[in-house]
Image: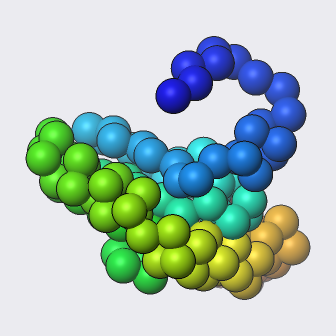
Amino acid sequence: MILAGRQAGVEELLRGADLFVLPSRREGLPMAILEAMASGVPIVATRVGGVPEIIEDGEDGVLVPPEDPGALAAALGGLLDHPDRRAAMGIAARRKAEREFSLADAVDRYSEIYREIARKGAPC
């Protein structure tokens, strides 16, 4: 395990990872998960906040209940013991990141929000 502190060049670190783990008690929509997905790394994360909106359990990652170390350990062991499953999840994660979370898509979504506000004449 590497606890490297604040780093530049995270993409390179992620490319060398077997999996990405985010055992949070609370989250919004974590960019760290999106970065890991874009790097093709499968995710193990707690089912909190916006995480289930990003990760499809069993498809591109594994979701576990928060504050359940046994479930977290089982999910980690399950992926570490099955490299083919881990690789398939990493491929699925990258595809989803490219399909649903690209910069171009984000710009399009924000543009649509602003157009909708302008159509309604709502004050900003």
Q: Would residue 115 be found to the left or right of residue 78 on screen?
A: right
Residue 6 placement: quadrant: top right
Residue at image location 80% in from the left, 45% down from the top: 11
The residue closer to the viewer here, 111 or 95, is 95
Indicate the colouring scheme. Answer: rainbow
Which residue is the extreme one toward the top? 5
Is residue 67 depicted above or below 120 in this figure? above
Q: Would residue 36 be found to the left or right of residue 56 on screen?
A: right
Counting from the top left corner in percent of width and height, residue 84 is at 52, 77
- Total labels drawn: 0
Counting from the top left corner in percent of width and height, residue 58 is at 36, 79
Counting from the top left corner in percent of width and height, residue 110 is at 74, 68
Residue at image location 47% in from the left, 77% down from the top: 85
Residue 81 placement: quadrant: bottom left
Residue 49 placement: quadrant: bottom left
The answer to whether any part of residue 109 appears in the image is: no
The answer to whether any part of residue 1 appears in the image is: yes
The residue closer to the viewer here, 58 or 120, is 58
Residue at image location 48% in from the left, 59% down from the top: 43
Q: Quadrant of the C terminus?
A: bottom right
Counting from the top left corner in percent of width and height, residue 73 is at 24, 47
Q: Would residue 14 be found to the left or right of residue 84 on screen?
A: right
Residue at image location 53% in from the left, 53% down from the top: 19
